[in-house]
Each structure stands twice: as structure tokens, then as C-alpha cells.
Image (cartoon, rainbow, N blue to C red):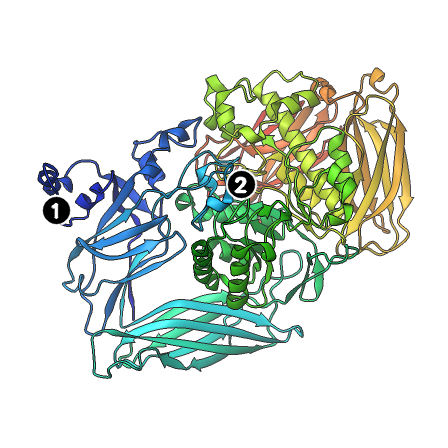
Amino acid sequence: MKTTIDLSGPAWSVREALGDTWRWYVDKPVTARNNVGEATARAGLAPGWLPARVPGSVIGDLSRAGELPDPYVARNSRCAEWVAARSWVYRREFGAPAPAPGERAVLCFDGVDPGARVYVDAVEVGTLDGLYRPGRFDVTELVADGGAHRLAVVIPPAPPGEPQVGRTDRVTRHAPRMGYGWDFCPRLIHQGIWRDVRLEIGTVHLSDLRVRAELDADLGSSRVHVAAVLEAADGASPAVKIAVRDPYGVTVADTDASVVDLDADKNSVASPAPRSHRFTTVVHVSAPLLWWPKGMGEQRLYTVEVRVSDTAGQAVQHTTTVGFRHVEMRPNTGGPAGALPYTAVVNHRPMELIGWNWAPADALYGEIDQSKVEHLIDLAARCGARILRVWGGGLIETEQFYDACDRAGLFVWQEFSQSSSGMQSAPSTSPGFVEHLREEARVVVPSRTHHPALLMWGGGNELEDDHGPLNETRSLALTALRDEVARLDPGRHWVPTSPTGPVFHNRLDVIDVRPDDMHDVHGPWEHQGLEAHYTLYNQGRALAHTEFGVEGMANRRLWRSLVPAADRWPTGRDNPVYRHLGDWWNNTEVVQDCFGGRLRTPDQVRRASQFLQATGLAYAVEADRRRWPRSSMVIPWQLAESYPNGWCTAVIDHSGEPKLAYHAVARAYLPERVTARVDRMAHDGGHAAVEAWIWSEPGRAEGGQVTAKLLTSAGGEVAAESWSVPGRVDQPGAAGMLMADLAGVGDLGDPVLFWDLEWRAADSSLIDRERVVLSSGPNLAPMLDLGRAELRVDVTSRSDDASTLVRVEHAGGPAVVGLQLSDDRPAGLAGWAVVDLDPRPLLPGETREFAVTWRSAPPSRRLLLESWNTDPLIVEDIAS
């Protein structure tokens, strides 16, 4: 059997190199003139080597070693900007058994950014060029003695790159651009051995494995396409057997693959040089169990086992998973003629693609821990998402990311690593760059085709020219990528960019002039104000709304670790620390305006901004969903941030803790809802109106009732009306409208009011209840004057799922607004508190229960319960 020696881990060291001084540190004799020659002999022994780990990043290693201040605090990232201008030498010692006769030792790199020269015992064994390209280097002769050896990896300076405000046609490499400076990430350029390293010893070596599953439209006939390159000793005559096992481990199909000797024309005399072979085969699977996206069925995964053996009895085995599902994209119901198809039909069932935009889990992507990726994907699935759009300014995501999405039932829209720029947003037309993209597609596409989660490929983010969003007729780069995807992954959906247009922006002036050209649009990413926000989203026309958001301040726990105490006020752009930590998304002025300029502390600004983010983003999502099936894609920006910001559009902060907006959108993504269509949040007296809308994805039989009420903060009824539900509920529809006269309400001392909507089935069982805040004044300042409320809290353990149940009872005072339960441990501790939070206002006499699950967290766990108008309360987890 093959022997694999893991070379990842903490046994590495690193040091910087300026110019060509890296040559001194790879143990290779250096010919140098003048006094440089005298220094080379001692250079490798000189102090300066720092502990390092693989996978990892240069900046991460320097920070852990104390050479850099924590780049995730205040403006410290500026202290790391010099790092990308240096070469960096990584090295480690390793031992390996001497290869037996016929065996080869192959050194394998899964990814180095931006590339590397690789040395074993001072001998250069190969180079890597590009972070997505793996490397395999034959080192048999170098390790033949079975002793100790030194591996050195020289990482060059980062190549020139374009920040967000620049020109896309100056980009020459297919790689993430966000680290060169983006609206949600300061300049923090990544370098490092960001994927695993290992040494493989054996007589047979397998590489370039390609697996792709197909399911016919009858849902009963399926195939698994398998191909790979293998190398074996001359005369070894490798044999390949492929087996497919169902989710229960039962073998449902197997076959022997025919192997073609690619070196058959070489001299047949036995030689120590390996011979290359290729096999391509198809395994037929009858009546497969289907893979479904979350909310539609189970995520059934089959195992494909590829076993290669030689005549000496040695074997290598590789397993991967596939899922069988049939997907087609159809034109949207009621959409304009000629529009691209945006409606996914999965196993013959149309589905609404609701989800999130995904940016890398960390700007230093070599530092990403798989447990964090699993955590974020679980949070996405928990909130009802069905798709993650992997944004083109970031990574082609990893195998581990895709595996997690396969298990969670989340579709993936993978964009190539191309993005817009502030000055020019069309890729280069250079033949060299176009060919570079073709080569990159040949690397990244085949290794991802086996994932049932992969729904579609995209050419990049927001690529456009003076005529609007780009398509293949106006871009050689996109034509090249489209053609390679079609060849390498036939049948998978493709879009040239996002948005596809024909118009780019979701704005009122565009809607007024070109309403039928609102096919796939982006924006806005900011709260539009207490009236304009609702006007815009009520008039939405998009078939696909694939990027939009609302900004908000950081969570309390992250904010305290991120911003030094002396720098926390003021919170606006006039503060250089906040300007560094999310300048584009700092809307302190808007927040202050919405609250009458009365916010006096950072905590008040944080709570107010997160309230606007939660209510504003949830309303935007609900407004789009009310237009299903004409609108079929609702994908806000963004799930989680790649860098800790003081202000950001993300709904999960860099530590992995959700903001209030995450929980608000989780309610907006429920399959059965009653929602409030309104025209503003603050009314300044006069009349107010709410239109109750209902939808049910599984479908509801006729009957039942919808009730709308206007309530005071004490729970008193100002107005109410009910409507029967006369027909079956499948698609969204209006149930009725309630109007109320607000004149004099504020004079009664209760300017904070609530729309309360309730939908009950024919048997009177509750389907959904919604409750939203409105002000009878000109802004939301009355929320600051809410009287203090009293809560009683009870904590119990649930034995069925090891979670904690926090029961919150309203015990006195007015309604509680902005109720939030969050992790209150010191920042930086491992793990997360996963809270099933209900963000709706809590009325007098009501009780609400929150389930809390601790994930990868050590004992001594505690939570913080806070709101607009209650005293903060520490909740100790009894399980700890």
C-alpha cells in the first residue's frame, strides 16, 4: 500500500528574504561577489528563523511570533503592508523510509500563494505558479537513503495587483483581489503555504482524478464519469476497479476500467522511469436515491471508490462522494421576453433560490480553520438559505467548503476570481491573459464537478463595460471561461457575470425608466432612510436580486476587542480607527438622523445601527420574496466578513457571531410567513397603513384567517381588522390592509407602536405571527424613551439534543424591543454559542424560549441578554 507522510503542521520555520538573499537559506552553495560571498556560509545558521505552521500564512506566522502586532486590531494591519514586498523561506526537517525497488517518492503541494520554488536538500525539485495549482515532484533519488532531509519552500513577493478602486484590465493573474484593499478589507496581501503538504511513497500514484455524476430527466437513470492519470513502474500493468456505494454503504455498481498506456510508444525495455497511464470510464447506477437542497428533501450522498493495484500487489485507493440530482434553469414566470433563466427546477420541482453572498472566511485564507467554515455553513443552512454565491473577488472555494455544502444541502454559485474595479471593470483582452484563464479553468473546474452542491459557474463579479454588464460577445476572457466550463463540466449552468443586467443597479430612477430591464440587478448596499428604503423595495422589479445589503456596526463582543477603549467615540468617519475598519459602510450620520441626533454613546449607536440593519435587510428580502415566482433569486450581501470591521454589511461578524440582522432574515426565509408591507417606519402623525401578505411554500388549503392590529407598547389595541383566506395559498398574495389614524397617539405618551400580524389555519392553529416597530413621530427617537421593562429568566438543559433552553418572561413595563442573546465570554476563546433567536418585540405578559447550542466551546460559558429598554443580564449556562 502507499505510504503517506503528512508534512503539514507546526514543524516549520520561516524567515524573510530581501532580493535574492533567499538563496542563502535553501542550503544551496551560492556564488557571490565581494563581501557577500563571505556571508553566505553563515547565513543559514544566523538568527531570524521564526516558528511557522502549514497550512498558514506569512502574516499569520509573523503575528504569532510577535514580529507583527495583531493585524485584526485597530489600524494594525498597516504594520503588515511591507510583508508582501519580501520573499519568504519556509523550511522543515523530515524523515522518510527508503523507497523499495519500483517505488517512487512524490512530494505533493495542494496550494502555495502566489507560487514557490521547492528544494529538498538544496536541490531544486520544481516550481509552483498560482495559488490554485497543485504541485507533484518526484524526489525518489533524493530520499533514497531513508534518512533525514530538509525541505525548503521559497515564496516570492506578491505580484502587483489591483485594489477595489483600480482597473480590471490591469489584472494579469487569476487570484483573489480583496487583500489588495477592498471596502470590507484593508490592504492585507496573502502569501503562504495555504494548503496541505505531504510525501507519497508507492509503486502506483494517482493524480488528476475527475468524477462527475449525471442524472437523466426521468430521475431513474444515472451515471458516474470517472477519469484519472496514474503512474506506475515500467511493467507494473496497473488495474483499476471502481465501486459506487449508496448512502448506507451498499455497493450498487462496480466496474473494471480500461487503462491506456500513454507511454506505449516508448522503448519497452524495463526502465526505472515510471510510465503514465490514463483511464476513463462510466459507471451506471439505476434508480438512485436523490440529493435535494435543504428544505426540499434529504442530502443523500454516494461514495465512489477508485482502487488502483499493480502486479506486485501494491494498491492506492481514493474515495470521493457524489449526489444525484437533476437541475435545469427555466425562464421566470411573468418575466420579459428574452431574459435569461433564473428559476431553478430541481428534480422537477421549482424552487426559490434564497441565500447569501459568500466571501472567504478570512482575508488570510491560509489561516481559515475548517471548523469555522463548517460553523458558517451551518448558520447559513439554519437560517433557511439554499444557495451561497461565492463572490468573484475572493477564492475558488476549497474541497472542504464544497463537502460541507453537499452535506448541508446548500447550492453553490461559484464565480471565477475576477471582479469589478472602481475605474474600469472589463477583463484584459490580452491573448496571454485569456490563455491564462483557460489554463486556470482546466485546474479548478474538474476537481469540483463531483459536488451535487455546485449549481452554476460564473465568470466573475460585476464585470461590465460602457454598455452594461458583460457577456461573452463583448469579452474574450468570458468566452474562454464559458467554453472551458462547457467542455469540462457539461450540463452545469453558466452565467457570464453577476449581475447579468441588462441594467446593473436596483434604483428608483432605473426602475422608472427601464422597468422591464431589471432582470438580474445589484444594490443598494445601504439603508435608504425611514421612508425611501420602503419606497424602493416596494417598487422592486428584478427577476434576480443577487447582491444587496444594509450596513451595521460590529457586535459588542468583537467591537470591544477590535477598537481600543480610547478610540471608541465618536463612531463616525471622523474617527481614524473606524475609518480604517469599514469606512465605506460607516453610516453614523444616517443612524443619527433616523434617531433624531440623540445617540450619545457607542452602545446606543451600535444598537441603533443593528436595528436598522435588521429591519431594513429583512424588509428588502421579504419585498423580493413577495414577488415570487416572477422573482426567483434573493441573495443578500453578505453572510460573514473576511476581516473584523467596526462597520460592515455582513450579518455574521468575523468571530462567527450573528448580528441581529441574521436572525431577522432567518424569519424572512421561513417557508410560511405573514409579512407587513408598509411605506415607512416613522409617520409624524397622520395615517399609517399595513398590508398583510402571506405565502406558503408547501401550500395551504383554503380557510383560516389573517388578523392585523396596531398595538401600543403596553399591548393596547389602537386598531384591528381580520380577513378570511378564501383560497389555497401557494404563491404570495395580499390578505388585506389595515389603516389607522395616528393623530394624538403620541400625545398619549406612547409614540412607539407595533404592527401585529397573525395568520391562523382553518383549525385555528397558528401558522405565523409578525410584529414590527413603527413610530408616530418624525423619526425613531421615541425608542430611546421607552420605559424600563423587567424580564425574568429561567435556564434549563435539554437532554434530547444537549442544548440549553433560555426562557425569557416579560414581567413588567412596556414592550421589549431589540431583544438579543449573545456570547459574553472574553473575545478570542474557542467555539461559538449558536442561538435560535427570535428578534420580534416582546409584549407585556409574553414568554419566549431561546435554544442555545455551544459548539466547540470549553466550559465556563455565559451569555448576555440585552435590549433597548432592559438592564443587561448575564446568563450563566448551567451545563458548564
The quadrant in which the N terminus is found is bottom left
Asked whether the viewer can see residue 468, the reply is yes
Left or right, residue 871 beside residue 543 = left
Left or right, residue 72 beside residue 869 = left
Q: Amino acid at mark 1?
A: Thr
- Where is residue 261 shown, x and y percent of the image? 34, 80
Q: Residue furthest bottom?
A: 268
- Where is residue 648 shown, x and y percent of the image? 56, 33
Left or right, residue 279 beside residue 835 = left
- Cα separation, mark 1 vs mark 2, equals 44 Å
With respect to residue 87, does 697 lie above or below?
below
Q: Which residue is mark 1?
A: 31
Q: Earlier in the sequence, mark 1 or mark 2?
A: 1
Task: Tell me which residue sits at (77%, 28%) in the image.
Answer: 774
Asked whether the viewer can see residue 315, the reply is no
Q: Residues within 10 Å of mark 2 (few under 14, many from 20)?
A: many
With respect to residue 129, does 19 lie above or below?
above
SS under mark 1: loop
Q: Nearer the viewer, residue 713 or 349?
A: 349
What is the number of the mark on residue 396?
none
Q: Nearer the viewer, residue 872 or 12?
A: 12
| Residue 492 figure quarter | bottom right
SS under mark 2: loop
- Where is residue 641 shown, x and y percent of the image? 52, 39
Q: Nearer the viewer, residue 681 or 124?
A: 124
What is the number of the mark on residue 421?
2
With respect to residue 60, does 726 lie above or below?
below
Left or right, residue 666 beside residue 60 = right
Q: Amino acid at mark 2?
A: Ser
